[in-house]
Image (cartoon, rainbow, N blue to C red):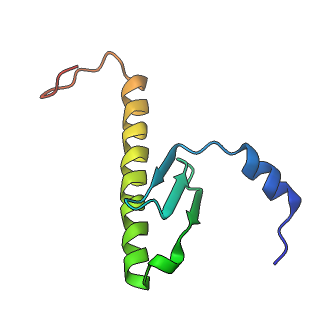
Amino acid sequence: MHLPEELFVAYENWQPDADVYSPDRSVRLRADQAGQVQVDLQDLHRHTDESLAGQVRAAARVALAALQAEAGAAERSDRPDERRYGHRW
């Protein structure tokens, strides 16, 4: 499959909001708030389908948490004078 060169230029300049690794570092997952995701795999000979799926799930959980935390922080900064009950500032 041949991809247009514009995709490679955009890819080089892409700045993900989350850049995480799986526990064994065989999966690197990069994602942004717009929903773009890049997954890099290495050392696949060490894995079965099931173990690789577990590593991908672990990386996805961390990336999702990072994206949600960033979105929450941005939302809070949009309303700096709003009171938050039950939490410290």
Count up the numbered dots: 0
Q: Where is the N terminus found, in terms of image quarters?
A: bottom right
Q: Is residue 62 above or below residue 88?
A: below
The image quadrant of residue 14 is top right
Q: Position of residue 65 (x, y in %)?
A: 36, 49
The image quadrant of residue 5 is bottom right
Q: Is residue 23 above or below residue 69?
A: below
76 and 41: which one is in front?
Answer: 41
Side of 13 relative to 51 (left or right): right
Side of 15 relative to 58 (left or right): right
Q: Position of residue 55 (x, y in %)?
A: 40, 68
Side of 76 relative to 25 (left or right): left
Q: Is residue 67 above or below residue 23?
A: above
Side of 76 relative to 83 (left or right): right
Q: Residue at x 52, y 47 (%)?
A: 33
Q: Residue at x 43, y 25 (%)?
A: 78
50 and 44: which one is in front?
Answer: 44
71 and 78: which one is in front?
Answer: 71
Q: Residue at x 42, y 39 (%)?
A: 71
13 and 24: which one is in front?
Answer: 24
Residue at the extreme bottom: 49
Q: Where is the C terminus found, in terms of image quarters?
A: top left
Residue at the extreme left: 86
Q: Position of residue 69 (x, y in %)?
A: 37, 40
Q: Is residue 14 above or below residue 39?
A: above
Q: Residue at x 42, y 84 (%)?
A: 48
